Amino acid sequence: MVRLEHYIPVGRARLRCGYTTGTCAAAAARAAAEALLTGLRPACVQVNTPEGIAVQTQPVEWSAGPGWVRCAVEKDGGDDPDVTSGIKIFAQVSRRPGERCAVDGGEGVGRVTLPGLDQPVGAAAINSVPRRMILQQLEQARQAAGETDGLRAVISVPSGEALAQKTFNPRLGIEGGISILGTSGIVRPMSEAALVDSIRLELDLLRAQGVRRLLAVPGNYGADYAKDHLGLRSRPAVWGNYLGESIDYAAGLGFESVLLVGHLGKLVKTAAGIFNTHSAVADGRREVLAAHTALAGGDRALVNGVYAAATTDGALAVLESAGLLKPVMASITRAVEEALSRRAGAGMEIQVVIFSHRFGLLGRTSGADDLLKRHQRDKNEATGGSGGL
């Protein structure tokens, strides 16, 4: 296996990145397609990831039959403690009459059984970005060989069904295996101590720059929403899953206020007092949604429907159909405000904006509008244009 020698600073550490299951599938598909169309098995293939980082891999475990070639790429998770690191992801490629290429899942790749996920019910759990990467590699191999027919790649993970039991796939209604994932194609290492250290270093820097009012987000979704929908152009502090430790540290540094902008899938957990929102630590999303559905007057059938939803957006769709979306989100937003205010203490104001990609703005805590106006009014005074005011 060719190691990806790409490193990032995380806190005071220097950690090696890896590549996603989607990148592995795309690389295996490219290698198998080249072998099918040229008769030569490439010793190495390169995939340019959406992140802009080129990944080179060595295909292994070749096999072939009438009209098809199959090979695997071993996943390199880098320094990230990922359950899929080291597994082999196979692609079997065959000719497909017509000009279009196609992708499907085989053994060990899950199937979607509930609505609300990236792929429709019945489809293989190969998310949109990996699908595009695989199709792109098939198309490039086809064009390079002058092939007029399309190609079909079937992605499989022999160990996938067993591995899926260590993930949230069964609860999400993805049955029979793992998902092929990755929006950037690259795995960035998740050392908890180093990540918390990195958050603290960023807060130290912002405070030293004179920032008083802090804009914070759990991740990219919140950053995009703050910019595109709230008009906040300053670069936010990214807290990841470590909301509790970040709030504690920010309060200790003497920040005047925090405006936290985040997706419901993360922030709903804080309504239950969960401040490390990583799925490996705690979940509680459906429990919170179901409890507040009951508090808002939902009957047993509605509570059961919300509890059974595979995603937060799925639960919101159930609530919208029942006409209870607004009162349930109002109840959850109050609980989020109480929990975060207790954590922040009396010395630091914290306000929250909660959204969903499908449903847009879902909730604002009682003082969020006022704090948002202060950020918008004073944004031109931001020190260096980053993190807050």
Image (cartoon, rainbow, N blue to C red):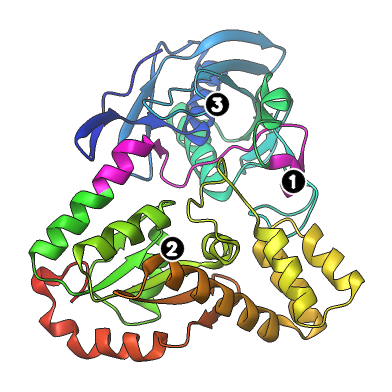
Magenta stretch?
Answer: 169-198
Q: Nearer the viewer, mark 3 or mark 1?
A: 1
Disc 3 from disc 1: Cα separation: 18 Å
Identify the residue shown where x is 41% and y is 45%: 184
Q: Residue 296 location in percent, x, y?
A: 75, 82
Identify the residue shown where x is 83% and y is 69%: 303
Q: Residue 334 location in percent, x, y?
A: 56, 80
- The quadrant of the image that shows the C terminus is bottom left
Q: Residue 253 location in percent, x, y?
A: 20, 62
The residue beneath circle 2 is 221
Precedes in sequence: disc 3 or disc 2: 3
The residue beneath circle 3 is 84
Precedes in sequence: disc 3 or disc 1: 3
Pointer 1: residues within 10 angstroms few (<14), some, or many (20+)? few
Secondary structure of residue under mark 3: loop
Identify the residue shown where x is 42% and y is 31%: 19
- 110 or 192, which is in the foreground? 192
Left or right of 215, for residue 179: right
- The quadrant of the image that shows the N terminus is top left
The residue beneath circle 1 is 171
Q: What amino acid is found at the position of numbered circle 2 in the picture?
A: Tyr
- 317 or 342, which is in the foreground? 342
State whether residue 217 is above or below residue 102: below
